[in-house]
Image: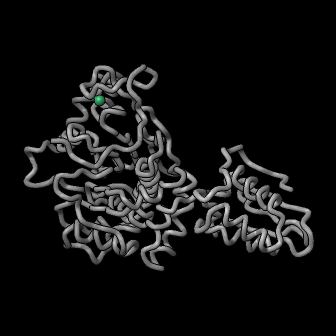
Amino acid sequence: MHRRTGPAATLWPVTESHRPFLPRTTPLLRLGPATLQVGGVDGDPGVRLGPLAPGLPAVLVALLRGLDGGRSARVVLAEAVAAGLDPDAVDDVLRALQRCGRLLEVSPEDLLAAAHTPAVRARADLELPAALAAAGPGSWRLRRASTVVVEGATRVGVPLAAMLAASGVGRVHVRDRGTVTAADTVVGGLTAADEGRPRSLAAADAVRRVAPEADLRPPPPGTAPHLLVLTRPWAALDPVHAGLHGARVPHLVATVRGEVGVVGPLVVPGRTGCLRCGEMTRTAADPGWPELSAQLHEPPAARSGPPAAPATGSTGVCTATAVTALTQALAHLDGQASPTCTDAVLELRVPDLLPVRRTWPAHPGCSCGVLPAGVPGPSRHDRRAPGTLEG
Ligand SMILES: [Zn+2]
């Protein structure tokens, strides 16, 4: 019945616990009177069904559009039989869609986490498919329960915070004690009208504009976020962040240095290399690096307050950096085993802004004690760290 499929996948059994979900954005296309194509455009996998008996394409379209994750596979089949469809044929269609990756699976917990209000559900319907396709059932619930702190209301940090909240992250807090300047305006972030306002308040407004349901408060006292994003230029070198590793807070660099967008490394203390590993690797390649890097950031003693967040990078570089950081942050929050910038950085340069991956391995001499990839040791890719501070 089906003629074209993508890579094989593990098939779900027809039980009460499996809830098939076909994103409503999936194209359902007619090819003549007797053939129906599901997906299969823009290089995506798809399935072509046919030849179908007269009237069957319309019935199948209704069946497929009803796969909203709200019913188990068993109920879907029972309803199909009640509508006069051959259960074996329907099962064949569902399995073909699953094999090619078009049919996702959603858990009841995912649906509960998506259904606060009609407006929230309408936005979640657009975000759910990407989360489920990337990390499977349960990933949406994880994302909704996540807390992210963005350190720095920068031209990368604020758009990133807004996108994280709009993508379903439940709690997003932007930390910055400075004041907005005219140069901070960026698409999706701070506006010209924010000039002179406290940066943290202006950033919260930017997040609220696209995700009014998001919790904007900092993590409760004594708890750590599931991820902290460092968005200030030269963030990887800032000694202010040295305590993150000791506190076992997963952290991600997402910044623009000069005109280069830099995303990564993603540091999961105890499981990946740390920022110091990267510095040691760089120093091994260039013994002059420590002297150079020391001139690239202000020593803490020279600061009168919290570190400044100078605006840097063009709109394109900042926005592309924020989007790239979004993908890596969500991969970590959704529980993916090894996001792309684990032990690596992604660099984005004009004119194309296509991410280029540079390996940033754990250094065997670093005090963090993580072994380089390939060296036997404890698992490096467990799920995300718990959100509680030690000590
Ligand atoms: Zn290290």
Residue 4 visible (yes or no): yes
Q: How many marks?
A: 0
State the scheme by which the image is colored. Answer: one colour
Instruction: Indicate the quadrant of ligand 1 in the picture.
Output: top left
In the displayed structure, 108 sits above or below 210; it is: above
Q: Is residue 282 left or right of residue 66?
A: left
Q: Is residue 34 left or right of residue 276?
A: right
In the displayed structure, 371 sits above or below 7; it is: above
Give residue 226's position: percent from left, percent from top: 32, 50
Give residue 338's position: percent from left, percent from top: 47, 39
Quarter of the figure that contains the C terminus? top left
The residue lying toward the viewer, choosing from 38 and 210, is 38
The residue lying toward the viewer, choosing from 213 and 60, is 60
In the displayed structure, 174 sits above or below 259; it is: below
Give residue 230's position: percent from left, percent from top: 29, 49
Residue 238 visible (yes or no): no
User: Could you tell me which residue is drawn at 34 percent across and 46 percent down?
Assistant: 252
Give residue 370's position: percent from left, percent from top: 33, 27
Question: Hey, which quadrant is residue 166 in on the image?
Answer: bottom left
In the displayed structure, 38 sits above or below 123; it is: above
Quarter of the figure that contains the N terminus? bottom right
User: Could you tell me which residue is drawn at 73 percent across and 48 percent down?
Assistant: 6
Question: Hey, which quadrant is residue 383 in on the image?
Answer: top left
User: Could you tell me which residue is drawn at 57 percent across and 61 percent down?
Assistant: 129
The residue lying toward the viewer, choosing from 90 and 302, is 90
User: Could you tell me which residue is drawn at 21 percent across and 46 percent down?
Assistant: 389
Question: Hey, which quadrant is residue 88 in on the image?
Answer: bottom right
